[in-house]
Amino acid sequence: MTEAGRMTQQLGSGQPSRRKTARALCFTRALTFAKMAELLRTPLVPPAVIRSASTGTLEVKEPLNFWCGGRVKPKDMKNTEPVYEPATGRVLCQMVPCGAEEVDKAIQSAQSAFLKWSKLAGMERARIMLEAARIIRERRDEIAELEVINNGKSITEAAVDIDVAWQCIEYYAGMAGTLAGQHVQLPGGSFAYTRREPLGVCVGIGAWNYPFQIAAWKSAPALACGNAMVFKPSPMTPVTVVMLAEIYAEAGVPEGLFNVVQGGAETGTLLCHHPLVAKVSFTGSVPTGKKIMEMSAKSVKPVTLELGGKSPLIIFKDSEMENAVKGALMANFLSQGEVCCNGTRVFVQREILPKFLEDVVKRTKAIQIGDPLLDGTRMGALISQPHLDRVLGFITQAKKEGAKVLCGGEPFVPTDPKLHGGYFMTPCVLDNCNDGMTCVKEEIFGPVMSVLPFDTEEEVLQRANNTTFGLAAGVFTRDVARAHRVVENLQAGTCFINNYNVSPVEVPFGGYKMSGFGRENGQVTIEYYSQLKTVVVEMGDVDSLF
Ligand SMILES: NC(=O)c1ccc[n+]([C@@H]2O[C@H](COP(=O)([O-])OP(=O)(O)OC[C@H]3O[C@@H](n4cnc5c(N)ncnc54)[C@H](O)[C@@H]3O)[C@@H](O)[C@H]2O)c1
Ligand SMILES: C[N+](C)(C)CCCC=O
């Protein structure tokens, strides 16, 4: 069975089991076999014993800003916003946005750390980053629990997110010592060489769906290249990123190297306009991405944009049906469907449509929704009440436009009274869809799968590409030639063959078209966090024209 398959099996089964949780971690594909074996040997422990936090109990009081090597209290309590625990609707903490003075302090702090960090040998940076990765591994359950409480996703998924975060830091630590330029021989013994140099203070701005992981995906390559970073998480998920800052500090980075400022659009704007900022890496929606690009253009700051999507998943009639169904679930229901690269337009070849729908609905109905801190839960709560209302609104609209709800699409109230104020809904499969419907054209960012029949390869390629987005795409088929021909013609930055949403840190991730540009993960990201200096060395006399 494939690794993602194991995860999918869990999505359908809803069986609480520590062994299964361990197996699910395989889907990152980056764990060593030894680690997997160790996890699988771990004895079964009841969830109540292994959790240090429980849903509906936590209040976060500590300051959530971090610069100059420590947590920093807000200057004043202006424009404070409540942060909710999605599973209960309770207020978890207050988010106090940073103003101009605080943003400047964080950037100055990063600048002074940059001057030290960038002068270290790559191997020295690597050693410190490896220590940070080790600490994250050690504190993985604690971080994952907090992520669940702040974001609402299931603990099984949050644990994977934290694993991916330390793997990313480990991966780029491995590269820090290998950064090198090129030597070019020129006539007469002269030569040139190139140096890969850091950019300076980089800004990271994150979305709320993968708060800790996004901060790791941005900071790991940035730090490996010798940069410093100021990171702003989403105002809805301010809690865990400051833990990453503490961990980097504990691992031994210079004071001020990785900083956290809290806030929303205003704070983000201050970061993008600051003259000391050398680069902005943004994860979020297309409209905000456009603003980031505009602001950065004013001072010619390079940007990385990881934006939204409406990705196609194409299932041909020769597919292995069970894998295709599992792939469709993985493409739609991870993190309550709040995933940028989800394959939410599921094109199914007409001959297999009835069987596909029967199986996909059966598995979707079996998804265990509820307390996200319980090991058996496979779907937690959406991020907020307005977002839940928006997602349900898409379903109402889809019905008006002629789609048929095969299952789900309703608000869900778990039996546990403490979850009655949570933002839960049942995952939804929509049939009878066509390409003109709102649910097929717009990013819903919720657990809503739109199924669309197709007849020919040529037709489905044209329809799959008929979108302004281009983040990801998937194809299921047993025909190897067809699989490669189809991905060659798909306009998407990340393509999956016979699987979906498998994103190991070694491979680049990013979009085409309005889904953004630049990449995260993989070797290529080094290029987005460094600049190349060319040095030409004359070994003879100057041959002057004058
Ligand atoms: N491609 C990817 O890797 C990826 C990953 C996760 C999420 N996303 C996308 O993110 C979106 C959901 O996240 P969201 O609702 O947090 O997105 P968003 O665009 O509303 O906000 C993202 C971040 O930008 C900040 N921001 C908002 N306005 C700003 C401004 N004017 N200047 C500077 N910063 C500003 C927000 O405070 C937040 O931190 C979806 O569209 C999803 O597809 C993309
Ligand atoms: C880890 N995933 C599932 C590939 C998600 C990447 C981030 C997108 O929202």
Image: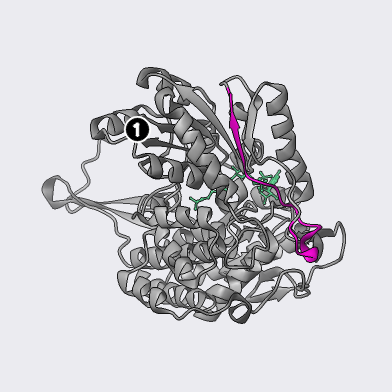
Left/right placement of residue 518 relative to residue 276 reads left
Residue 323 inside the magenta-drawn segment = no
Could you say which is closer to the camera, residue 307 or residue 67? 307
Quadrant of the frame with the N terminus: bottom left
Left/right placement of residue 390 relative to residue 22 reads right
From which residue to which does the magenta span run?
414-433
| Three-letter amino acid code at the position of disc 1 | Val
Write the residue at 36% across / 29% down.
317
Write the residue at 48% across / 55% down.
199
Q: Which colour scheme is used?
A: one colour
Residue 2, how many percent across, how many down?
35, 54
Provide the secondary structure element on which disc 1 rests: helix
> Would residue 376 be visible to someone looking at this image?
yes
Residue 59, how many percent across, how many down?
78, 72
Could you say which is closer to the camera, residue 7 or residue 29? 7
Write the residue at 39% across / 73% down.
40
Residue 423 inside the magenta-drawn segment = yes
- The residue singled out by tag 1 in the image is 487
> Image height check: is 357 above or below 187?
above
> Image height check: is 348 above or below 153?
above
Main SS class of the magenta portion in the image: loop
Quadrant of the frame with the C terminus: top left
> Image height check: is 41 above or below 182?
below
Residue 482, how many percent across, how many down?
28, 29
Could you say which is closer to the camera, residue 424 or residue 268? 424
> Would residue 312 be visible to someone looking at this image?
no
